[in-house]
Image (cartoon, rainbow, N blue to C red):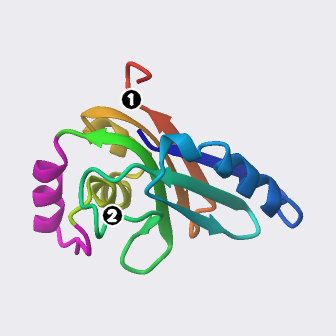
Amino acid sequence: MCGITGLAGSLRTDRQTLLRMNDALHHRGPDGEGFYWDDHVGLGMRRLAIIDVEGGNQPIFNEDGTVCVVFNGEIYNFQDLRQALEQRGHSFATSSDTEAVVHAYEEYGPACVEHLWGMWALAVWDQSEQRLLLARDRLGK
């Protein structure tokens, strides 16, 4: 299973902290890592590649790069959710369940979590709204 890390607030000096946090999760995600960083938030993730092994690297962004997600877990209904989002005009670049999360956030805002069935934890950074959404599945898997 993957792992996610993050920091919020004044981040000018905390990049090394985020890197160390992510390194501590290497055992949870030996297949890769990814980072997002700006002046307000730093997000990291370690990946155990299961779905979309080639294209599912994170963080994953929306079409214009203003919303990003780091994600751990599995969305069981992501194919149905993806189909519904495509019908609403969203474009997908990967086959990853993680990408369904970022587009669900665009469509439903923080209520996107009500559309996610599975076991998961996520961090969504909405740069335009300056909003960080942290959530996990209902059972806390």
Figure quadrant of the N terminus:
top left
As shown in the figure, which amino acid type bears the numbered disc 1?
Asp
Q: Position of residue 126 (x, y in %)?
A: 54, 62
Identify the amino acid type marked 2. Answer: Gly
49, 66: nearer the viewer = 49
Residue 91, given in percent of the width and then of the height, sits at 22, 75
> What secondary structure is marked by label 2?
loop
Identified at 54% across, 41% down, the residue is 27
The residue identified by callout 2 is: 56
Other-residue count near label 1 (Cα within 10 Å), few / some / many at <14 / 14–19 / ≥20? some
Question: Is residue 51 something one can see in this rendering?
Answer: yes
Q: Residue tagged by mark 1?
A: 137
Q: Is residue 103 magenta?
A: no
Which quarter of the figure has residue 89?
Answer: bottom left
**Which numbered circle lies on residue 66?**
none
Which of these two is toward me, 126 or 37? 37
Q: Is residue 79 above or below residue 117?
A: below
Mark 2 vs mark 1: give the one in front.
2
Is 5 on the left or on the right of 95, as rendered?
A: right
61 or 31, which is in the foreground?
31
Asked whether, in this view, residue 109 is left or right of residue 90, the answer is right
Q: Does residue 141 appear left or right of residue 66 in this picture?
A: left
Instruction: Locate residue 48 relative to residue 33 in the image: left or right.
Output: left
